[in-house]
Amino acid sequence: MKIGMIENGPVAVTEKDGQFQVVPIEGADTVMQAWAAGEQRLDFGNPRPLVPQELVCPIPEARQVFAIGMNYADHTKELHVTAPKAPSVFTKFPSSLTGPNVTVAHHGEKTDWESELVVVIGQGGRDITESDAANHIAGYMVGQDLSDRTVQFLNDPAQFSLAKSFAGYGPIGPWLTTADEMPNLDKQTVTTMVNGQLMQESTLGHLIFSPAALVAYLSSIVALYPGDLIFTGTPSGTGVGHDPQIFLQAGDKIVSAITGLGSLHITMS
């Protein structure tokens, strides 16, 4: 099931003849409420064509937003750093979250792109085993971890959280795809297009720490709650990894996509 959010509440997103439709969900006010109720216990309205611009942030109320650095080997190589022995964790503050079709004001001269898989926690808990982690994952989304490299690398060691938490620096969506729809998650491809040029491309199977491993590791230290988000890291191809480095400018258009999950469309202003 794909559950999106519009101004009036959550909607089921379906595809027919190559076109997306939305079906209003009655009896739920949020995406997570609709997920928790389950498809069989929900009442649905009449389907209609989807207008992409009506989709808003699917989970703006996330209690915790985790992010994982250096979780693709090729990304560690382009930044000339050692691959981590354990997940390298920071946070994006929830106030940075926004929807899938947005205009975002960039700050400074070194705003960079990072397309990522976002894991959505369903059933929370502590000390979740890796083998049981799938039972705690509601589903997946596409995320764009926009990053101000000036703020990030102003000090040594680097400052990740604030550099990635400007308003609008956390687009997610376009909807929650429930975990049961993604049995072959590791075979899906993540890409970034900037002004029509392919900048990033990898498969989710190249993650150093899988979603299950991340859930197990995080829950061994902190409690996880329904609706928590985990940005799982980005592959190589970021602007800071280019030689010479390149960064986003006003008017640039970014498309972050993962096969099976959808795409985000972001314009920088």
Image: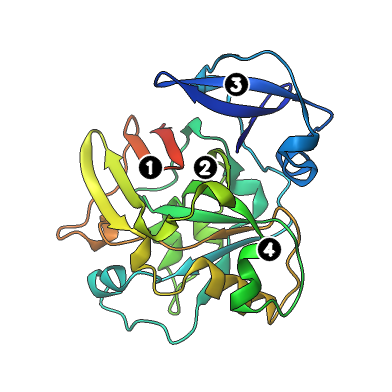
Toward the right, the furthest residue is: 27
Q: Which residue is mark 2?
A: 171
Measured Cα–Cα span from mark 1 to mark 2:
10 Å
* Mark pair 2, 3: CA separation: 20 Å
- Secondary structure at numbered mark 3: strand
Query: Is residue 57 visible to us here?
Result: yes
Compared across the picture, whether 188 is left or right of 241 comes to right
Q: Residues within 10 Å of mark 3 (few under 14, many from 20)?
A: many
Report the amino acid beneath label 1: Ser
Kindly report the distance in space between the C-alpha atoms of the residues bearing marks 3 and 4.
26 Å
Disc 4/disc 2 C-alpha distance (Å): 23 Å
Do callouts 4 and 2 mark residues in contact (Cβ within 8 Å)?
Answer: no
Mark found first going from the N terminus, 3 or 4: 3
The quadrant in which the N terminus is found is top right
| Residue on which the image places disc 1 | 256
What's the amino acid at mark 4? His
Q: Which residue is mark 3?
A: 22
Closer to us: mark 1 or mark 2?
1
Residue ID for mark 4: 136
Task: Judge whether residue 110 can be spotted in this image.
Answer: no
- Mark 1–mark 3 distance (CA, rounded to whole Å): 22 Å
Q: Residue furthest left?
A: 243
